[in-house]
Image (cartoon, rainbow, N blue to C red):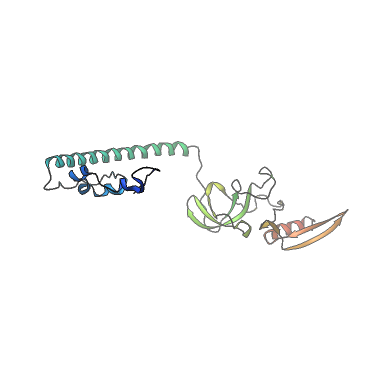
Amino acid sequence: MINLTKKGAPFQGGSITSGVHSELIRIGWMIDHPNANYGFDPRMGFEPPQPQPENVSRHRQIQHQAAEEFATRMEAIRDCLRTEMQYAQSVYEDQANSSRSPAPAYKVGDKVWLNTRNIHTERPSKKLDWKATGPHTVKAVISPYAYELDLPSSMKDLHPVFHTSLLRPATGDPLPGQVNAVPLPVVVNGEEEWDRVASKQAESSCLLGLIDSSKQAATLAQCKQAGLA
């Protein structure tokens, strides 16, 4: 019950809303519509036709028949609109898919690169940021368009499920003999985490160090082969 009062009004305390008008009692409104006193939203349903009530006036019978006809007509209109919407969606889908390529299907254990367009890193600007991280291992297939990845501990705050548009397959070694750039260190709680200092040397007035991380074992071996270690 809504209590609307104003200072100085004679019907303070909601007394004006607590009574039932005598006219409503006379026409039997509270008997025919018991939910009207509770402020429920009107319900419009398209249920199957109900049997004609017995022992009612001719006026009520006409109202019942008109309501059943209205419900049947609205149900037919709803079915027609649903069919038209499904047809329009299929036309839009065909037009959109004409310029799209099928999404690659990944399976558990595949290696993929994760696009960083929605990931905030510690790089000074998005232009200088890495375009993708990984490769990450597919941990579970949620749907043909969503995959769960096995993310490192530094990315534990991210939800591990990503859309296939953010993933691309990671190839093994497309260019044999090419030394890939050293990736960024693993970031844990805003600080860089390293396993050990593999090698160091003094050059002019600074000290250069080769850092070894568990995620960079292959890169360390490549650096040693290139004479950088």
Q: Give the total number of marks visible in the rendering.
A: 0
Quarter of the figure that contains the C terminus: bottom right
**Residue under the image location 73 percent in, 59 percent down:** 220
Q: Position of residue 182 (x, y in %)?
A: 72, 53
Q: Position of residue 186 (x, y in %)?
A: 67, 57
- Left/right of residue 82 with respect to residue 176 in the rendered view: left
Q: Nearer the viewer, residue 196 or 69?
A: 69
Q: Nearer the viewer, residue 96 or 76?
A: 76
Q: Is residue 39 visible?
A: no
Q: Is residue 141 visible?
A: yes
Q: Position of residue 19 (x, y in %)?
A: 27, 47
**Residue under the image location 32 percent in, 38 percent down:** 81
Rendering quarter of residue 57? top left
**Residue under the image location 21 percent in, 42 percent down:** 23
- Left/right of residue 214 with respect to residue 100 in the rendered view: right
- Left/right of residue 30 with respect to residue 124 in the rendered view: left
- Left/right of residue 98 with respect to residue 35 in the rendered view: right
Q: Position of residue 82 (x, y in %)?
A: 33, 40
Q: Nearer the viewer, residue 41 or 72?
A: 41
**Residue under the image location 77 percent in, 55 percent down:** 226
Spot the residue most to the bottom. 196
